[in-house]
């Protein structure tokens, strides 16, 4: 199955859900606890391609230094995305002061996430680095920070991090991480994105606070609990009678980037129907048989990619011109030649799209060394 070949799908850490009710206090006071730093789809890694796991005290000092841009600072961060959890104002709006029978945890609780533990008893936490990058403007897409590279003034100075470490986007380094590190980083990135995007109660608009070790947000006004969301999306290798694969170039992608078709599942829709609908909407190709091939968490910001191989009943291609600017059929020889010539930039090695293409191709894609 494809799923066995996807780094972001593998994990060797027990999530320890039964310990979330105790919060992170026990883990914070244990000397064997190890912490990764996470922010906006990126984690801190070492030069040899592993997560930079540090002690609790080191994580506190580094997080404060990154947020202030001062390598000598150990200042704690008490705000979340520019807001004070214990204060009276959040994002410029008054809280429901006095309306809550729920005690708000200390503001620092919003920064910690319990990821799990391994067979040796080591507990793993994530420390959110709050305020490293400015919040996106109102009206921006929810994943704008994931896809837009940080500007020079948003990237913290190298001196802030320990020598030999750096901020690494999970999208870039995911395929190179070990099973344990990929599992930890994927959970951390997904939870960090959820917390950043859900500071308020969807029922009443009041502030929510992090509880259950970062896996639940509770409204301080009505006490309702809210959980991390996962948006299912289908992604498919569409093949015709000649066993050619249908690849597309999306409007949002840089020149030369081609990949398999994908799209979100709509309410009340089966996965198989979503495959057929998305292919028809974006390319006009009619799909018949649909075969499940695997799945992959895709925390950019909160998707689960469910992969299929689909058989086309028609071959005429008409790109919709909105989401997809171009789409065409590739034989195996066509794709090998286009990739070798640099005319086609395939999906990244951490993605299930790449696994789908290589599963069809029967071998790893050989990309130009200049990439």
Image (cartoon, rainbow, N blue to C red):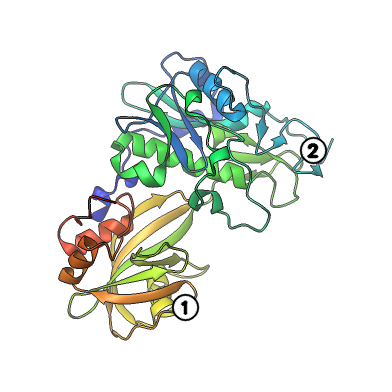
Residue at the spot x=15%, y=61% of the render?
362
Question: In this rendering, is residue 347 above or below 285?
Answer: above
Question: In this rendering, is residue 360 above or below 96?
Answer: below
Residue at the spot x=19%, y=73% of the render?
331
Q: Disc 1 marks which residue?
A: 321
Left or right: 110 in relation to 184: right
Instruction: Specify the quadrant of the image occupied by residue 210.
Output: top right
For marks 1 and 2, give the one nearer the viewer.
1
Residue 294 position, x and y percent, is 30, 57
Residue 186 position, x and y percent, is 41, 42
Residue 89 disc label: 2
Residue at the spot x=33%, y=46% of the render?
9
Residue at the spot x=47%, y=66% of the render?
265
Q: In which quarter of the image is the N terminus?
A: bottom left
Instruction: Specify the quadrant of the image occupied by residue 282.
Output: bottom left
Residue 128 disc label: none
Question: In this rendering, is residue 154 above or below 352?
Answer: above
Identify which residue, 289 or 2, lies in the foreground. 2
3D distance between C-alphas at marks 1 and 2: 44 Å
């Amino acid at each position: 199955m494809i799923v066995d070949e996807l780094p972001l799908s593998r994990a060797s850490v027990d999530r320890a859900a039964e310990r979330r009710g105790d919060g992170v206090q026990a883990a914070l006071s244990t000397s064997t606890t190890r912490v990764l730093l996470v922010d906006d789809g990126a984690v801190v890694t070492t030069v040899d391609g592993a997560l930079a796991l540090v002690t609790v005290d080191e994580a506190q000092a580094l997080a404060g230094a990154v947020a202030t841009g001062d390598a000598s600072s150990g200042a704690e961060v008490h705000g979340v995305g520019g807001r004070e959890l214990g204060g009276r104002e959040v994002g410029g709006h008054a809280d429901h002061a006095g309306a809550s029978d729920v005690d708000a945890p200390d503001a620092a609780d919003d920064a910690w996430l319990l990821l799990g533990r391994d067979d040796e008893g080591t507990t793993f936490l994530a420390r959110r680095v709050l305020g490293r990058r400015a919040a996106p403007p109102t009206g921006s897409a929810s994943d704008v920070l994931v896809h837009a590279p940080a500007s020079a003034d948003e990237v913290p100075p190298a001196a802030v991090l320990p020598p030999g470490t750096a901020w690494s986007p999970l999208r870039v380094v995911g395929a190179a991480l070990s099973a344990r590190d990929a599992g930890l980083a994927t959970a951390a990135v997904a939870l960090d994105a959820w917390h950043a995007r859900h500071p308020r109660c969807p029922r009443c608009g009041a502030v929510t606070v992090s509880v259950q070790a970062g896996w639940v947000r509770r409204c301080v006004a009505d006490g309702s609990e809210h959980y991390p969301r996962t948006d299912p999306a289908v992604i498919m290798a569409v093949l015709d009678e000649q066993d050619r694969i249908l690849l597309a170039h999306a409007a949002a992608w840089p020149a030369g980037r081609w990949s398999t078709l994908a799209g979100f599942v709509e309410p009340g829709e089966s996965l198989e129907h979503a495959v057929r609908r998305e292919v028809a909407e974006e390319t006009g190709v009619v799909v018949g048989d649909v075969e499940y091939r695997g799945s992959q968490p895709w925390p950019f910001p909160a998707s689960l990619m469910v992969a299929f191989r689909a058989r086309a009943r028609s071959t005429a291609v008409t790109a919709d011109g909105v989401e997809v600017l171009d789409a065409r059929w590739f034989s195996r020889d066509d794709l090998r030649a286009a990739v070798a010539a640099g005319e086609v930039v395939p999906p990244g090695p951490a993605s299930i799209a790449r696994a789908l293409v290589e599963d069809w191709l029967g071998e790893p894609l050989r990309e130009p060394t200049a990439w």
